Image: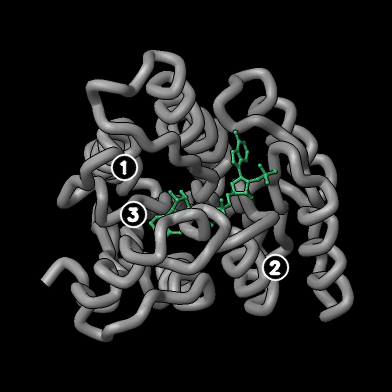
């Protein structure tokens, strides 16, 4: 029986690549989105065209009620979630002195509270199955910091502590919990950066180029697989040598 994967923010960018790769590897995939129904249905259509099974599920992952009903819909249609990929994330950049409390709260809710809510829901069935994979997309910004991203970096650092704690709580049930920390990846999230910022970033990457969503997805595919059965509480940096 194929496994069920839920990818939050699976409609665009890195999440889309993860959804397509997990489907290619035989998972039935729930593609979560917040506002872009058309993009999510596009990912589902591609998966079905390729012979897979998928479902688009709308939910603001920062809302407890929305997450509860998302897990119910996924369970009813595809079955209980075996692989959770906490990918949905936003940036609301500003230097700290200009960062208002609304954007602070929005980033904390979308990038961090979402991880708590989705992981908690997913663990219930994983504990019963005595098997599970929780993979959260962090960022090198959470490890090294980044000016203008105190809110974003705080969430990406927090999920490391969250992941290590939960890995210790559920390891005895055959569940692994890990973080993937990408460097610079070409998506809508980074498309608006000024050209000189992009060029400066490229110059500091050992491989001298940005990563692709597919390159992040392949790391997720590995951690989701049986081959990665002895890796838990780990932060896998996928940044082309940026952090060296
Ligand atoms: P994109 O902006 O391209 O895509 C974001 C996705 O998240 C969309 O599918 C969007 O759906 C969804 N989303 C946003 N808010 C919510 C919400 N409240 N509830 C549910 N879904 C939501 O981002 P990326 O692909 O670039 O980023 C994906 C992850 O990778 C993020 O966690 C990001 O922090 C991380 N990352 C990205 C890097 C990069 O360079 N791109 C580097 C390091 C980490 P919708 O369109 O419906 O709103």
Residue in the image at 28% along x and 78% along y: 240
Mark 1 crowdedness (10 Å alpha carbons): few <14, some 14-19, many ≥20: many
| Front label number (3 vs 2) | 3
The disc, 3 or 2, on the residue closer to the chain's N-terminal end is 2
Q: Is residue 181 left or right of residue 3?
A: left
| Front label number (1 vs 3) | 1
Q: In the image shown, does 110 or 225 lie closer to the viewer?
A: 110
Mark 3 crowdedness (10 Å alpha carbons): few <14, some 14-19, many ≥20: many
Q: Quadrant of the C terminus?
A: bottom left
Q: Which residue is mark 3?
A: 178
At numbered mark 1, what does the secondary structure look like: helix, strand or loop? helix
Residue in the image at 50% along x and 31% along y: 110
| Residue 158: quadrant of the picture | top left
Q: Position of residue 208 (x, y in %)?
A: 28, 84
The disc, 2 or 1, on the residue closer to the chain's N-terminal end is 2
Q: Are marks 1 and 3 in contact (CB under 8 Å)?
A: no
Residue 2: numbered disc:
2
Q: Which residue is mark 1?
A: 156
| Front label number (2 vs 1) | 1
Q: Is residue 53 visible?
A: yes
Q: Position of residue 232 (x, y in %)?
A: 28, 57
The disc, 1 or 3, on the residue closer to the chain's N-terminal end is 1
Mark 1 CB lies closer than 8 A to ligand 1: yes
Q: Is residue 114 left or right of residue 57?
A: left
């Amino acid at each position: 029986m194929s496994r069920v994967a839920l990818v939050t923010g699976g409609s665009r960018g890195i999440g889309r690549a993860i959804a397509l790769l997990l489907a290619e590897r035989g998972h039935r995939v729930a593609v979560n989105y917040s506002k872009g129904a058309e993009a999510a249905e596009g990912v589902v259509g591609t998966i079905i065209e390729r012979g897979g099974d998928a479902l688009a599920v709308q939910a603001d992952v920062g809302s407890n009620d929305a997450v509860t009903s998302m897990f119910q819909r996924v369970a009813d249609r595809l079955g209980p979630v075996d692989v959770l990929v906490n990918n949905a994330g936003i940036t609301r950049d500003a230097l700290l002195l200009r960062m208002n409390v609304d954007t602070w709260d929005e980033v904390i809710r979308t990038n961090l509270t979402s991880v708590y809510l989705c992981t908690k829901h997913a663990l219930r069935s994983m504990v019963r199955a005595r098997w599970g994979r929780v993979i959260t997309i962090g960022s090198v910004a959470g490890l090294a910091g980044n000016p203008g991203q105190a809110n974003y970096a705080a969430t990406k650092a927090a999920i490391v502590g969250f992941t290590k704690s939960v890995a210790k709580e559920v390891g005895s049930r055959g569940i692994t919990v890990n973080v993937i920390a990408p460097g610079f990846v070409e998506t809508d999230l980074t498309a608006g950066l000024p050209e000189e910022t992009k060029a400066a970033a490229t110059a500091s990457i050992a491989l001298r180029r940005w990563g692709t969503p597919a390159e992040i997805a392949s790391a997720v595919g590995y951690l989701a697989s049986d081959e990665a059965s002895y890796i838990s509480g780990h932060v896998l940096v996928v940044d082309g040598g940026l952090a060296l």
